[in-house]
Amino acid sequence: MPPAQPAATASTAPDATLMFAPLKGRGTVWAIEHRFSVQARSEFDDGWGTLDQAAQQERQAPGTQVIEEHARGILAGNDSPDVGFDLSINPYRGCEHGCVYCYARPTHSYLNLSPGLDFETRIVAKVNAAELLREALSARGYTPLQLNIGSVTDAYQPAERRLRITRAVIEVLAEARHPFSIITKGSLVERDIDLIAPMAQAGLAAVYVSITTLDPALARTLEPRAAAPQRRLRTIETLARAGVPVGVSVSPVIPFLNEPELERILQAARDAGASRAFSIVLRLPWEVNPLFQQWLDQHVPDRAARIMARVREMRGGRDNDSHFGTRMTGQGVWAQLLRQRFDKACLRLGYERERIELDLTQFRPPGRQVGQGQLF
């Protein structure tokens, strides 16, 4: 079998202007081949207008398919010193929010799906997540650790409205008095305040809301199906008023795109009730790199080269840096200036610098459920 060929880029694909033109509600329409592909495809004009027909089909907004999965495990361990939790739960794989910069896009490669279009249109729902969590927490010898919900893909993406998997997970955590944090761009988290607020008041829950930009026009193309920026600010306010400690994630910071807004976002989130803040610079692992650069060429062609030059300056001359310690912050003079701006803004606005500490001592193993009932 011949070796896999590099995936075609937008600039070399046939009819690229038409086939890769943006569509409302999608971060990308490029079904980029993933890095494990063993076959390469190329377009061929057979004289019957096949390429034109294919291009027109690409212009039809693709719908979302939710694939229900019975997962084998639900708790994922973390060995990275760059993040402040030990375990994570991700009820979904793929994310309909469609954020073009999402570092999780390459995970769809393990499903033999495209990190591009498939990532935001082929959503895998772990329908047995709550049952798996109950089993894990009730296992003999389980020790509670800092746990985060939604670290890879958003637990409050649109599919959650119907499936309610995230809510079922939180119900188990509440029963077990197990502390957890949530990070989300979805206003749907407000639905679960009845569960989150009592946990928060006991020192067992915290929520972080990610705000990338305050510009609704930029948000519509950068993260098309996430809640609008002003809606996220309202979510922060709603959670804070309910007594839930709320942080803001100003991430990712993209030079010359949303970077000029850094201080304004921190100010707006603080006014809404956020008490903590953190920030991560843009990451471009694997297939995210060509997808994001193609997005730049489409939406901000006048700044595309300048943005990528600054990204490389913060990544040691490369498009991406995957090393622990620098992958979240970048390196070099420009990364240091960004950090100084962030630190000074947080100091001026009165943000607390330590993460929200959650109490691990209240944990009690949940009861095991058998069928419709519960034993002991």
Image (cartoon, rainbow, N blue to C red):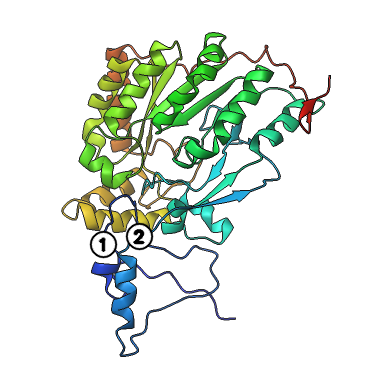
> Looking at this view, is 333 or 17 the one in front?
17
Residue at position x 49%, y 62% from top? 34
Image position of 240 (left or right of 311): right
Measured as percent of width and height from the top left, residue 31 is found at 41, 63
Q: Residue 87's spot in the image, x, y percent?
A: 62, 31
Q: Residue at x 62, y 24 (%)?
A: 171
Question: Which of the marked residues, 1 or 2, is nearer the chain's N terminus?
Answer: 1
Q: Report if the CB atoms under discs 1 and 2 are less than 8 Å apart.
A: yes
Return the mark for residue 29.
2
Residue 232 vs residue 314, the one in the foreground: 232
Q: Quadrant of the C terminus?
A: top right
* Label 2: which secondary element: loop
Q: Which mark is residue 21?
A: 1
Three-letter residue code for mark 1: Ala
- Image quarter where the N terminus lies is bottom right
Disc 2 residue type? Val
Q: Which SS class for mark 1?
A: loop
Position above or below: 348 against 279: above
- Residue 197 placement, left or right of 230: right
Q: Residues within 10 Å of mark 1 (few under 14, many from 20)?
A: some
Residue plotted at (29% across, 41% down)? 254
